[in-house]
Image: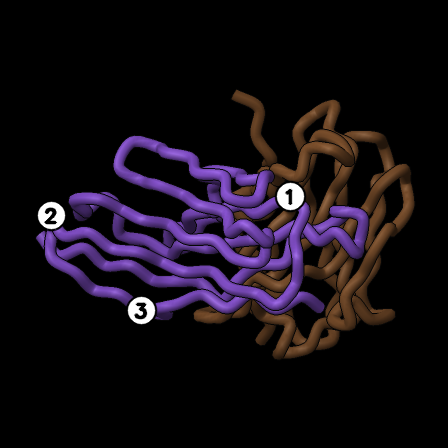
Chain colours: A purple, B brown
Amino acid sequence: TQLLEQSPQFLSIQEGENLTVYCNSSSVFSSLQWYRQEPGEGPVLLVTVVTGGEVKKLKRLTFQFGDARKDSSLHITAAQPGDTGLYLCAGASLQTGANNLFFGTGTRLTVIP
Amino acid sequence: EPEVTQTPSHQVTQMGQEVILRCVPISNHLYFYWYRQILGQKVEFLVSFYNNEISEKSEIFDDQFSVERPDGSNFTLKIRSTKLEDSAMYFCASRPDRTNTEAFFGQGTRLTVV
């Protein structure tokens, strides 16, 4: 089982601040996805990164895939209360032929107005 | 926009009873999954299904669990004899094909075993 560690586990910040969430593994992934999950709902896909070193931007969110495809980061600029939620990274493994996703431990973000 | 739908949204069952959780994946998707999330814990992979058979399963997916796609649209997860520790949110997901790793999740079924 590929282990994806996310840090920090919990993050509470003031509206307007910037933050970065990290997702690290010792395994290489064919792709990595970031999801956001609200309480009582399923994960919602935010972005997929495929190429080592790839950077994708989604409004105030910037996602980066590590050069070695073992890690990723999510940076949020000028956080807003609507960004509050559980952020999950998930890697598609090369070893399993990319047949399933392994989820990270999650980062619970709270943005205080 | 196409979406994965799951029913029921909440299921309460007595320990030892059988439950069937239902999912309708996005049509023309080829890969189907079940995941579970115990309250406050991480999302855990249970099983993947492709070409009408299980392609991978985790150690959680023991012989009390089974999946099937009986009619080409529904994808079901059956737990034969539920235990208290089976209480969790169960999520179904589907993917278009082998090359596209983006998985789309349903809203989940909250299973409570009493």
Disc 3 designates what residue? Answer: A10
What's the amino acid at mark 3?
Answer: Phe
Q: Residue at image x 59%, y 54%?
A: A68
The chain containing the residue under callout 2 comes to: A
Query: Marks 2 and 1, how far apart in space?
Result: 34 Å
Disc 2 designates what residue? Answer: A16
Q: Quadrant of residue A9?
A: bottom left
Q: How many marks?
A: 3
Q: Residue B65: where, in percent of width, then height?
A: 80, 64
What's the amino acid at mark 2?
Answer: Gly
Q: Residue at image x 57%, y 47%?
A: A32
Q: Is residue A11 left or right of residue A105?
A: left
Contact? badges 2 and 1 (CB < 8 Å): no
Q: Is residue B5 left or right of residue A75?
A: right
Q: Residue A23: where, in percent of width, then height?
A: 47, 60
Question: Are there few (<14), some (14-19), or many (20+) residues within 10 Å of tag 2?
Answer: some
Q: Residue A1: where, in percent of width, then height?
A: 71, 68
Q: Which mark is residue B93?
A: 1
Q: Residue at image x 79%, y 56%?
A: A95
The front one of B53 and A49 is A49
